[in-house]
Amino acid sequence: MSKPSISVPSCSARHRISVNMNRLRTARGLSQEKLGELADFHRTYVSQLERCVTNISVDGLERLAAALGVDVVELLQPLMDGDASEGAHVLTQQNLHRSGR
């Protein structure tokens, strides 16, 4: 039996973390693998966070913020209009890549 797919609202904290995390990671020139090393996460977990596939604990959020050199608040910042659409673009591109299209 497969799990039902859950849609994440674009205004959710999980979505904001996902978009802000991707923006900060790429601005610093970090790969998902390198960010995972810095935060003591597996690369696939970083990918899952950026795709809104999984949740992160408060402790994990603190480790992620430290690895990115920001305060936790930076990861929870509300998205600007461009950020929300960019986040959707990133998530769409990752899902297409994952499906082999």
Image: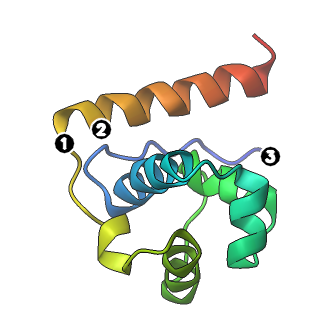
- Residue pushed farthest front? 28
Residue 47 x, y percent position in the rendering = 68, 50
Q: Quadrant of the C terminus?
A: top right
Q: Residue at x 53, y 50 (%)?
A: 52
**Nearest the eye: 76 or 12:** 76
Residue 1 circle label: 3
Q: Residue at x 31, y 43 (%)?
A: 10
Q: On the rendered structure, is 50 left or right of 83?
A: right
Q: Residue at x 31, y 56 (%)?
A: 12
Residue 23 x, y percent position in the rendering = 44, 47
Residue 44 sits in quarter = bottom right
Counting residues from the N terminus, which is met first, the one under dot 2 or under dot 3? 3
- Residue pushed farthest top? 101
Counting residues from the N terminus, which is met first, the one under dot 1 or under dot 3? 3
Give the residue number, with chain letter if any, for mark 2.
83
Alpha carbon of mark 2 to alpha carbon of mark 3: how far? Answer: 36 Å
Q: Residue at x 29, y 75 (%)?
A: 73
Q: Of the residues shown, which amino acid type is indicated by label 2?
A: Asp
Vertical arrangement, residue 17 with respect to residue 6, above or below: below
Alpha carbon of mark 1 to alpha carbon of mark 2: how far? Answer: 5 Å
Q: Of the residues shown, which amino acid type is indicated by label 1?
A: Met
Q: Of the residues shown, which amino acid type is indicated by label 3?
A: Met
Residue 11 circle label: none
Residue 35 x, y percent position in the rendering = 68, 63
